[in-house]
Image (tube, grey):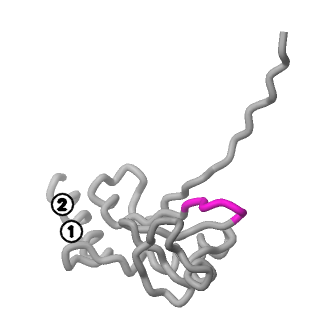
Amino acid sequence: MTTLPEPTVQATRYVVSCFEPDDHDGAHFNLAVEYRGRGLWAVVRHSQCLAADGTWSWESIPSEREDEWLATHRFDLDTALKLAKQAAPHITVNGYTVADALRMAAKHTADQR
């Protein structure tokens, strides 16, 4: 009988949000920090990646990514999480800010009581 290796476990995606994890409406405002290999992570939202300077750009297919682009859009985990946490409160969806959505959710909850 062959001895099988012990399975390894690695987190490859973190969700960063200003909303509770079970808030389905808040999920539209989520960012993700995703593992991209070689110990590097990306801050992503809808096929866009956050750059170190706080700007967003479309993530092209791997064969079209230039070294210069990768250098500004790939981070160690701590840096990626820090950048995502800084960006999360500033996400806008259909003209609504995170603050607008939180205010509407609180009003809806109060109206349900």
Q: Is residue 8 above or below residue 33?
A: above
Q: Is residue 3 above or below residue 110?
A: above
Q: Which residues are magenta?
A: 34-39
Q: Which residue is mark 2?
A: 108
User: In the picture, which quadrant includes the N terminus?
Assistant: top right
Q: Position of residue 43 (x, y in %)?
A: 51, 70
**Residue 55 or 29: which is nearer the viewer?**
55
Q: Count neighbours of disc 2 (C-alpha within 10 A) and say few if under 14, some if 14 to 19, many if 20 or more.
A: few
**Residue 113 or 27: which is nearer the viewer?**
27
Q: Pick out the residue farthest to the left.
A: 111
Q: Position of residue 12 (x, y in %)?
A: 60, 53
Residue flagged by tag 2: what amino acid is it? Answer: His
Q: Count neighbours of disc 1 (C-alpha within 10 A) and say few if under 14, some if 14 to 19, many if 20 or more.
A: few
Q: Residue at x 66, y 60 (%)?
A: 37
Residue 60 lies left or right of residue 92; in this view the side is: right
Q: Position of residue 46 (x, y in %)?
A: 36, 66
- Under circle 2, the secondary element is helix
Q: Position of residue 104 (x, y in %)?
A: 21, 68
The question of residue 35 being in magenta is answered with: yes
Q: Which residue is mark 1?
A: 104
Q: Is residue 6 above or below residue 96?
A: above
